Amino acid sequence: MTVLVVGSGGREHSLARAIAADPAVAAVHVAPGNPGTAAFAANHPVDPCDPEAVAALASRIGANLVVIGPEAPLVAGVADAVRAAGIACFGPSAAAARLEGSKSFAKQVMAEAGVPTGDCVVCQDEAGLVAALDRFGPPYVVKHDGLAAGKGVLVTTDRQAAIEHGRDCDRVVVEEYLDGPEASLFVITDGTNALALQPAQDFKRVGDDDQGPNTGGMGAYSPLPWLAPGVVDQVMTEVVHPTLARMRELGTPFTGLLYVGLAITSRGPRVVEFNARFGDPETEAVLPLLRTPLAQVLYAAATGTLDSFGELEFDDRAGVCVVLAAQGYPASPHVGCKIVLPPDTSDAYVIQAGTSLDATGQLVASGGRVLVVVAAGDDLAAARRNAYEHITRIDFAEGFCRFDIAAKAVLEIAANGV
Ligand code: GLY
């Protein structure tokens, strides 16, 4: 099988790496990819948000499967163009990707499907926004309705900041704050059949102890020792299958990856958000643990034959990933810092997320989240240790990371023996 992965970040490097490890895969291409993917795949300088260009590339290289990483190409209709060219595509149509592309659409589908989630109000002017904020009270949750490159969601106790965040946008969704730890559940679906990956947790704030501004994610771990057995089955029954059924009824079946962002509240799991693609950096922590060959299961989802697979299989190790970001991230990351990577070890390796080669061929930082150190271990403590040890071997003078990724879970395991 020849597979084309669309995107250029850490998630796409991680997906391409796992796809390349599938024995059914003969060649991996990435559009546009990054220096990390160039080590084992063919990179192509194609705009990932240009539907015709991606479809033309897929045809030219004889792709059997196209896997779309980020949300922007999905919302732009890249999956539709690839399917129209007669090529199997893992990723929802533009119409179905509205589950991520429009927060108000997602909330409407959840309401129609009876999915447990927080109350919300859709606001189109400042008076409505202020009334909604005062109805729910702090902490305030204000989401821009459309895609906003990770900058659309604000959770704050500062009422004035909440008003200003909403004022910049034509249409915002104000939501009830959902208390409780968050979990990310990735579900591979062909529109009817659905298989859950092992849940993960990510760390959205830039600083230790969840201080500072929100980011795209500073690290993740899997599995979640604190998550009660049965929660995944409950979410599949109460959230995933009703949502997929409603999307079919609407004439826009959702195929691809349904990312269910959950708050595990005292009243049970509640949906915080849907995304239409693999999460980043949770993907980096989860995929190394997956034993089921990834390309084969994505192909089955893309061709409506997911019922031919049983449950996904995972090894019983733990995975931890830690993001190394550039100084100034998330507000204004400093690019250009030289990077030298160590060789992989049996337990740890580096995924490239925001890198490029300078004129001399030197690897340099070119984005906010630059590297993702991925480690496995026999338990969460070992995986965490392996990740932070590997970071000490990286030469990236301006890189910084959080030091508490998975720390609380490791302490809880030590205290409770779970
Ligand atoms: N980890 C958060 C996201 O992918 O949106």
Image: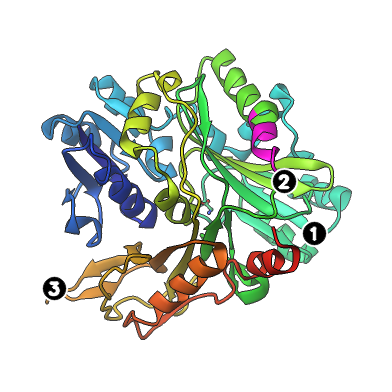
Question: Disc 2 and disc 3: Cα gap in Å?
Answer: 49 Å
Residue, disc 2: 228
Q: Is residue 168 visible?
A: no
Main secondary-structure element of the magenta-colored stretch: helix
Helix, strand or loop at disc 2?
A: loop
Q: Is residue 186 above or below residue 289?
A: above
State the residue in front, 76 or 373: 373
Helix, strand or loop at disc 3?
A: loop
- Report the residue at 62% width, 76% height from top: 208
State the residue in front, 231 or 164: 231
Number of the front mark, 2 or 3? 2
Quadrant holding the C terminus: bottom right
Quadrant holding the N terminus: top left
Crowding at label 2, few (<14), some or many (≥20) Cα neighbours within 10 Å? Answer: few
Q: What mark, if any, has residue 408 been given in the picture?
A: none
Q: Residue 144, percent across and down?
A: 61, 48
Q: Earlier in the sequence, mark 2 or mark 3?
A: 2
Q: In the image, which residues are magenta?
A: 228-236
Question: Disc 1 and disc 3: Cα gap in Å?
Answer: 47 Å
State the residue in front, 356 or 26: 26
Question: Disc 1 and disc 2: Cα gap in Å?
Answer: 26 Å
Mark 3 residue type: Gly
Specify whether residue 29 is painted magenta: no
